[in-house]
Image (spheres, rainbow, N blue to C red):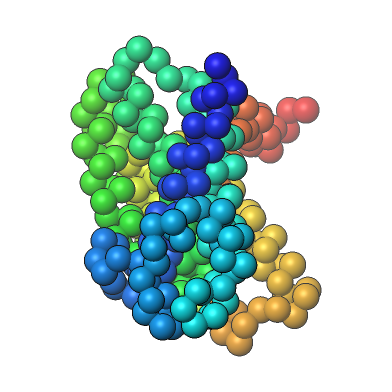
Amino acid sequence: MEFIYSIFVVCFGLILGSFFNVLIWRLPRHESIVRPPSHCPRCNRPIRPWENIPVASYLLLGGKCKGCGQKISLLYPFVELATAGTSLLLWHTVAASCSSNWFHNVHLALQCFTLLLMIPVTVIDIRHLIIPDAITLPLLGAALVVSFFPGDTTPFQSVAGGIVGGGTLFGIGWLGKIIFRKDAMGWGDIMLLAAVGALWGPKVALLTFFFGSLTATLGAIILALLHRLNADHYIPFGPFLALGLWVAVLAGDLLVTSYMKFVSGLFFGGY
Ligand SMILES: [Zn+2]
């Protein structure tokens, strides 16, 4: 039975990944995500339903548009496979805490969906250096709504999380603007962490920020060593916030406890 569930989750992930590809292509171009139906961006040939099957169609078409022979980016099947793989991972970790309380399950489903949304957020931010409001604002709204469900994050924690998450990045951006005289933090990053805070509460928002900053610093050092930093030294923060969120949620309380131990060790010198 467990195997059948896993197959179902993988199929769900592939279809969701296919939807993420639509977001990745259309949101930065301010296009509607429903109209017009999928078409080749070069020759406008409509994509038939059987050419729209995740991964399989890419292989059957040999990675080329049937109309004009334009190469289809490997990113499409990659996003579909990545979404399927991470869906399965979530199914075996986070989703295991499903309960008979349906309010809790809706909350959990929104959290899992948000974790998966980090895939298109990462791709869009790397390609276009933005995180669309069309992703973060509905997420923030939905997080505030489900906080009224009994059992999980309370409306107070949700609002506090939103303020802590968004406020932290806003404050850092403000400081950066004073010190470096240029925009240090994007609006999209601020809204993303506000939505994360509203959905999980202040603790996860701060942990996401902590792990996000840590990996971003490491990433910047590695890029600098490889001489791959661009001219204005701008690195999209979204992918690191996404990674930070995954670490914060999956490593959960274990990391909080060891982090607190580490911090108290620093202040009180206890080993
Ligand atoms: Zn074409």
How far across and how far down the image is residue 56, in percent? 56, 54
Q: Nearer the viewer, residue 92 or 161?
A: 92
Which quadrant does the C terminus fall into? top right
Q: Is residue 8 above or below residue 33?
A: above
Residue at the image position 41 percent from the left and 41 percent from the top: 113
Residue at the image position 21 percent from the left and 37 percent from the top: 145
Given the current orientation, which residue lies at the most extreme bottom position?
A: 231
Residue at the image position 62 percent from the left and 67 percent from the top: 62
Residue at the image position 53 percent from the left and 58 percent from the top: 57
Label count reads 0
Q: Is residue 165 left or right of residue 242?
A: left
How far across and how far down the image is residue 207, in percent? 52, 42
**Visible residue check, residue 143:** yes
How far across and how far down the image is residue 106, in percent? 32, 28
Given the current orientation, which residue lies at the most extreme top position?
A: 100
Q: Nearer the viewer, residue 173 or 81?
A: 81
Q: Nearer the viewer, residue 35 or 198?
A: 35
Q: Nearer the viewer, residue 258 or 199?
A: 199
How far across and how far down the image is residue 264, in percent? 64, 32
Which quadrant does the N terminus fall into? top right
**Visible residue check, residue 246:** no
